[in-house]
Image (cartoon, helix red, strand yellow):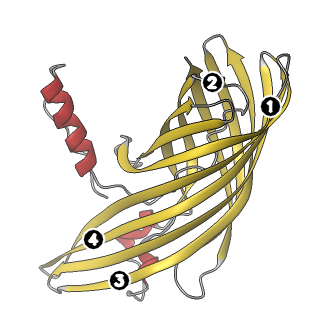
């Protein structure tokens, strides 16, 4: 697993901030999770001109791992930690209610490696939501339909030594996709809202494995589709300026490549947001 190296202590200047951002961009992720189709915050709460900033953490779906390149008879033991279905991940999102029924949103995907537990920038998304149903001032039902374009990437590296020979294995992943969530919220009262979010996802992913050292070789999984659909649900609590929203998503998802099996995934998460 590629480790995030510590940098010099931040000085608080703009130059230091730029260097820190560059260091994060250079970090390698430990898996390739998707940008969530639902950050668990309720629909219908924003008015024209409002902004909503949020962060979320969840067990996000992993699009691919080393075995999906299909070039090795078995995944090396050192890389087994990458062969997972979900991975702890976090998102940072910003929404702007541009018109009464149109919301624009930007999102950064931050992958949290298990060791060390530090966010790494692995992708971003840009999307729009259209409000289909607007609730009343006192509460009730609201619904929004969204579309989000996603780009994510990650690298994984292991170093192996056997019988005096050394070899480095590197897996690289790139994916582009489209997510279509529907966010349906019933606001019970000013303090409590319940949300359901059915969603569909379609990604095109490319992965390649490079061996350097005793053997120099490269194998690739060319762009392949991966599809999924599911249902997310959440309960949101308005705590003054903050909204706390724990939830869970249930998802059926394919893996890349021919003959790959479909997986059932259980993805709990939590989001914290504020409106301004």
- Of the residues tagged 3 and 1, which is closer to the observer? 1
Q: Separation of disc 1 and disc 4 at Cα?
A: 49 Å
Q: Which residue is mark 2?
A: 48
Q: Tag 2: Cα neighbours inside 10 Å, few (<14), some, or many (≥20)?
A: few
Query: Quadrant of the rendered structure where residue 160 is?
Result: bottom left
- Residue 10 rendering spot, x and y as whole percentages: 17, 24
- Residue 257 rendering spot, x and y as whole percentages: 52, 83
Q: Separation of disc 4 and disc 2 at Cα?
A: 47 Å
- Residue 19 rendering spot, x and y as whole percentages: 16, 36
Any mark on residue 134, and which? 1
Q: Which residue is mark 4?
A: 170
Q: Separation of disc 3 and disc 1 at Cα?
A: 48 Å
181 vs 76: above or below: above
Q: Which residue is mark 3?
A: 220
- Residue 249 rendering spot, x and y as whole percentages: 70, 50
Q: Name the element at disc 2.
A: loop
Residue 255 in view: no
């Amino acid at each position: 697993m590629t480790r995030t190296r510590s940098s010099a202590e931040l000085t608080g200047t703009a130059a230091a901030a730029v260097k820190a951002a560059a260091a994060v961009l250079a970090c390698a992720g430990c898996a390739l999770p998707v940008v969530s189709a639902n950050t668990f915050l309720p629909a219908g709460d924003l008015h024209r001109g409002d902004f909503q900033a949020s962060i979320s953490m969840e067990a996000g779906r992993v699009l691919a791992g080393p075995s999906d390149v299909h070039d090795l008879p078995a995944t090396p033991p050192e890389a087994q930690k990458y062969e997972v279905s979900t991975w702890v991940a976090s998102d940072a999102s910003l929404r702007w209610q541009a018109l009464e029924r149109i919301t624009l949103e930007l999102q950064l995907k931050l992958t949290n490696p298990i060791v060390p537990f530090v966010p790494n920038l692995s992708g971003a998304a840009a999307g729009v939501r259209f409000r289909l149903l607007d609730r009343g001032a006192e509460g009730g039902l609201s619904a929004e339909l969204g579309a989000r374009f996603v780009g994510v990437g990650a690298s994984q590296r292991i170093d192996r030594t056997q019988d005096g020979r050394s070899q480095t294995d590197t897996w690289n992943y790139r994916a582009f996709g489209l997510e279509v969530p529907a966010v349906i919220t019933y606001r019970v009262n000013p303090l409590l809202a319940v949300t359901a979010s059915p969603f569909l996802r379609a990604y095109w992913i490319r992965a390649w494995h490079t061996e350097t050292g005793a053997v120099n070789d490269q194998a690739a999984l060319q762009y392949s589709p991966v599809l999924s659909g599911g249902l997310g649900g959440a309960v949101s609590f308005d705590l003054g300026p903050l909204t706390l929203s724990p939830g869970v998503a249930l998802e059926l998802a394919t893996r890349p490549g021919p003959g790959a099996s479909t997986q059932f995934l259980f993805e709990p998460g939590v989001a914290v947001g504020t409106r301004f």
